[in-house]
Structure formats: C-alpha cells, structure tokens
Amino acid sequence: MALFMIERNFAASLNASAEDLRAVVDINTVVGVKWLYSFLSADKRKTYCLYEAESGEAIREAARRAGLTSLVLMLTLVGPRLAAQNADLQQRVADLKESTAKNKEEFET
C-alpha cells in the first residue's frame, strides 16, 4: 500500500455530517482505500487528506463514487529510502504543480 496526500478545494464551506463521513468511509472500503487523516482549513473550503491505497486510481474512483470531484493535487508519499528508487519523483511533482495551477485557474473562473 502506498500513501497519498490529496488536496481539495470547495466552493462553499464544508460542513459534512457524521452520516456523510460514514458514507465516504463505506465507499472507500469498497474500492480498497483507507482514509487516515484530514486537515480542514480555517475557512472550511480546503482539505488535505492522507490516504492509504494500492493506487491513485483507486482514490480517484472512491472520490468519483462519493461525489468529491474537487481533487486539486495528488502526491504519492515516499520515505527517504524509496525516494532514491524514484528518480522521476521530482518531475512528477513539477507536473502536479503545473496541473494544480491550471486547475486553480479553472476553479477561480
């Protein structure tokens, strides 16, 4: 299992109920995603969530099923030993930053 950090932006303040959160956990379980933690911004319009999953595609599928289409950025987290094995990590991060900038422009328009 890999670790993924997901950034999401919301047009309005996020006010999820306990029932909403349980539904997300149930959907994640079906597709093999484990939601570990979330950090919510002070204005409740941005989240950073840590997940454990086999792939980024599993996280995208869980988000699609849950109606969380506001994915801005997905990073695969690696430890120091794994980073040496992932020579393309820096390029992937640069690509994600560029994609994030484009998504931000589309979101704000």
Image (cartoon, rainbow, N blue to C red):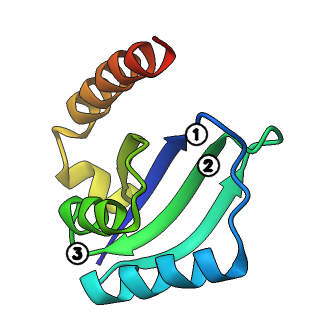
Q: Which of marks 2 and 1 is in front?
A: 1
Name which residue lies at 40% across and 67% down: 66
Query: Would you say the residues marked 2 and 1 are in contact, meaning their CB atoms lie under 8 Å apart?
Result: yes
Marks 3 and 1, Cα distance to the nearest angstrom?
26 Å
For label 2, the crowd category at 10 Å Cα-Cα, with few meaning under 14, some 14 to 19 and many 20 or more, is some
- Callout 1: SS: loop
- Name the spot of residue 91 as percent of width and height, x first: 21, 28
Image quadrant in which the N terminus is located: bottom left
Badge 2 or badge 1: first in the primary sequence: 1
Residue 54 is marked as 3
Q: What residue type is labelled 1?
A: Phe
Q: In this view, does 55 lie above or below 90?
A: below
In the figure, residue 62 lies in which quadrant? bottom left
For label 1, the crowd category at 10 Å Cα-Cα, with few meaning under 14, some 14 to 19 and many 20 or more, is some
Badge 3 or badge 2: first in the primary sequence: 2
Name which residue lies at 36% across and 58% down: 78
Q: What residue type is labelled 2?
A: Thr
- Callout 3: SS: loop
- Name the spot of residue 98 as percent of width and height, x first: 31, 19
Q: Is residue 29 above or below residue 11?
A: below
Query: How many numbered discs sit on the rendered protein?
Result: 3
Q: What residue type is labelled 3?
A: Glu
- Name the spot of residue 12 as percent of width and height, x first: 67, 38
Badge 3 or badge 1: first in the primary sequence: 1
Q: Name the residue under label 1.
A: 10
- Callout 2: SS: strand
Marks 3 and 2, Cα distance to the nearest angstrom?
21 Å
Q: Nearer the viewer, residue 23 or 50?
A: 23
